[in-house]
Amino acid sequence: MNVDKDQLTEAFEYLDELRESGITNMFGASTYVERDLAYGRKEARECVTLWMSTYDGDLEVSDRVEKALAIA
């Protein structure tokens, strides 16, 4: 894995806000993560992939991050 727990937490919080804003389809979200969080392309894609595989609007970010770390 190319990202750590703190990066995942930051990215998941950002991606939740991005999703709520409706600015982009989430399949294009890695470009925003790269630009706004200054992650490399590989790290941004990894974060978005993990976010998509663990997204659940009923769970806290910290719970989803733990779930992502378990599957990564």
Image (spheres, rainbow, N blue to C red):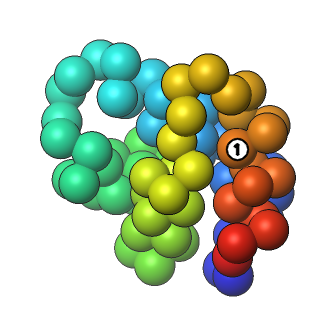
Q: Amino acid at mark 1?
A: Arg
Position in image of residue 8 (x %, y %) = 68, 53
Picture quarter containing residue 24? top left
Q: Tag 1, which secondary structure?
A: helix
The residue where tag 1 is placed is 64
- Quadrant placement of the C terminus: bottom right
**Circle 1 Cα neighbour tier, 10 Å, few/some/many (<14 / 14–19 / ≥20):** many
Q: Which residue lies at the image location 55% right of the left edge and 34% below the top edge?
A: 56
Position in image of residue 58 (x %, y %) = 62, 22
Q: Which residue lies at the image location 54% right of the left edge and 25% below the top edge?
A: 57
Picture quarter containing residue 13? top right
Q: In the image, 13: left or right of 29?
A: right
Between residues 10 and 25, which one lies in front from this camera angle? 25
Position in image of residue 59 (x %, y %) = 68, 28
Q: In the image, 25: left or right of 30?
A: left
Q: In the image, 69: left or right of 19?
A: right
- State whether residue 47 appears in this view: no
Q: In the image, 38: left or right of 72?
A: left
Q: Which residue lies at the image location 34% right of the left edge and 28% below the top edge?
A: 19
Q: Which residue lies at the image location 35% right of the left edge and 18% below the top edge?
A: 20
Q: Is residue 42 above or below residue 37?
A: below
Residue furthest top in the image: 21
- Quadrant placement of the N terminus: bottom right
Picture quarter containing residue 7? bottom right
